[in-house]
């Protein structure tokens, strides 16, 4: 059986480095197993979060929701995607319409094969990210904005990802594109719900776990695998 893991909220706290004790255990656990990562982040961020020992000792990393594939640090495949001026203008309007006042910059971040849209911005500190995350939990703003994007532009797809972002890609360019390469598989993610960026790939798994944190992932692995 293959294993596929999201990163933020699944193997690490969001945008954070992996816990050293968990990293040491995980390195031993992955020996003789087929392991893949499926994350919306780019490779540089994944390397920063997990370290080279883990990144170079698993089968493959599907970055940018599967639009960039890395094996032992080398990109072996990528997809291209560029938002149109009309789509970019729509995102700017959503940004200006949000009642959440804090702005930190880098609100529309291009990645390989996708974009990440964030009202608070990718330059936010951990505390500022927490402010927006708590606001979004109450307001449901990201889910609302993702639905508006999908309704307005049926050729692209927007899903909620991480603590503050919305992942945007060409339709079908989400994590589900990974499934054909890794079946059969067990999947671990923290956004396995309609509109979440783990939902599309989880549907193809033999078994999936919607975890609340990396602590829960660790406990499940120790107890079941």
Image: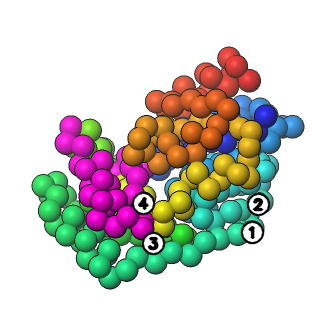
Is residue 13 shown to the viewer in this render? Answer: no
Q: Quadrant of residue 74?
A: bottom right
* Residue 157 circle label: 4
Q: Position of residue 129 (x, y in %)?
A: 32, 49
Assess whether mark 1 and mark 4 are in contact (beta carbons under 8 angstroms): no
Identify the residue at the far bottom of this view. Answer: 85
Left or right: 176 in relation to 115:
right
Tell me the mark number nearer the camera, choosing from 3 and 4: 4
Q: Is residue 61 above or below residue 218?
A: below
User: Which quarter of the figure is the N terminus placed in?
Assistant: top right
Q: Is residue 116 above or below residue 221?
A: below
Tell me the mark number nearer the camera, choosing from 1 and 2: 1
Specify which label sits upstream in the sequence, 3 or 4: 3
Assess whether mark 2 and mark 1 are in contact (beta carbons under 8 angstroms): yes
Kindly identify the residue that appears in the image at 19 percent across and 42 percent down.
Answer: 139
> Is the residue marked by circle 3 packed among few (<14), some (14-19), or many (20+) residues within 10 Å?
some
Disc 3 and disc 1: Cα gap in Å?
20 Å
**Secondary structure state at the residue bearing disc 4:** strand
Disc 4 and disc 1: Cα gap in Å?
24 Å
**Secondary structure state at the residue bearing disc 1:** strand
Disc 3 and disc 4: Cα gap in Å?
15 Å
- Say whether residue 70 is magenta: no
The residue labelled by disc 3 is 110
Specify which label sits upstream in the sequence, 4 or 1: 1
Specify which label sits upstream in the sequence, 4 or 2: 2
- Where are the magenta residues, as a range? 138-164
Specify which label sits upstream in the sequence, 1 or 2: 2
Q: Position of residue 22 (x, y in %)?
A: 64, 33
Disc 2 and disc 3: Cα gap in Å?
22 Å
The residue labelled by disc 2 is 71
Assess whether mark 3 and mark 2 are in contact (beta carbons under 8 angstroms): no
Left or right: 88 in relation to 138:
right
């Amino acid at each position: 059986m293959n294993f596929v893991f999201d990163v933020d909220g699944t193997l690490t706290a969001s945008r954070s480095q992996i816990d050293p004790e968990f990293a040491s255990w995980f390195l031993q656990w992955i020996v003789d197993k087929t392991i893949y990562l499926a994350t919306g982040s780019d490779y540089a961020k994944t390397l920063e979060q997990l370290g080279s020992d883990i990144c170079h000792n698993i089968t493959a990393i599907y970055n940018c929701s599967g639009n960039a594939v890395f094996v032992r640090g080398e990109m072996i495949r990528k997809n291209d995607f560029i938002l149109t001026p009309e789509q970019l203008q729509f995102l700017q309007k959503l940004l200006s319409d949000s009642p959440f006042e804090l702005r930190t910059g880098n609100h529309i971040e291009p990645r390989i094969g996708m974009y990440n849209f964030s009202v608070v911005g990718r330059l936010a500190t951990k505390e500022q990210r927490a402010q927006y995350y708590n606001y979004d939990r109450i307001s449901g703003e990201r889910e609302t904005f993702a639905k508006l994007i999908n309704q307005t532009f049926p050729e692209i797809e927007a899903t909620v990802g991480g603590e503050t972002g919305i992942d945007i890609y060409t339709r079908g360019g989400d994590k589900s594109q990974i499934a054909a390469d890794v079946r059969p598989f067990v999947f671990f993610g923290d956004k396995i719900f309609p509109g979440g960026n783990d939902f599309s790939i989880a549907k193809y798994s033999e078994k999936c776990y919607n975890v609340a944190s990396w602590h829960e992932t660790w406990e499940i692995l120790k107890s079941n695998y």
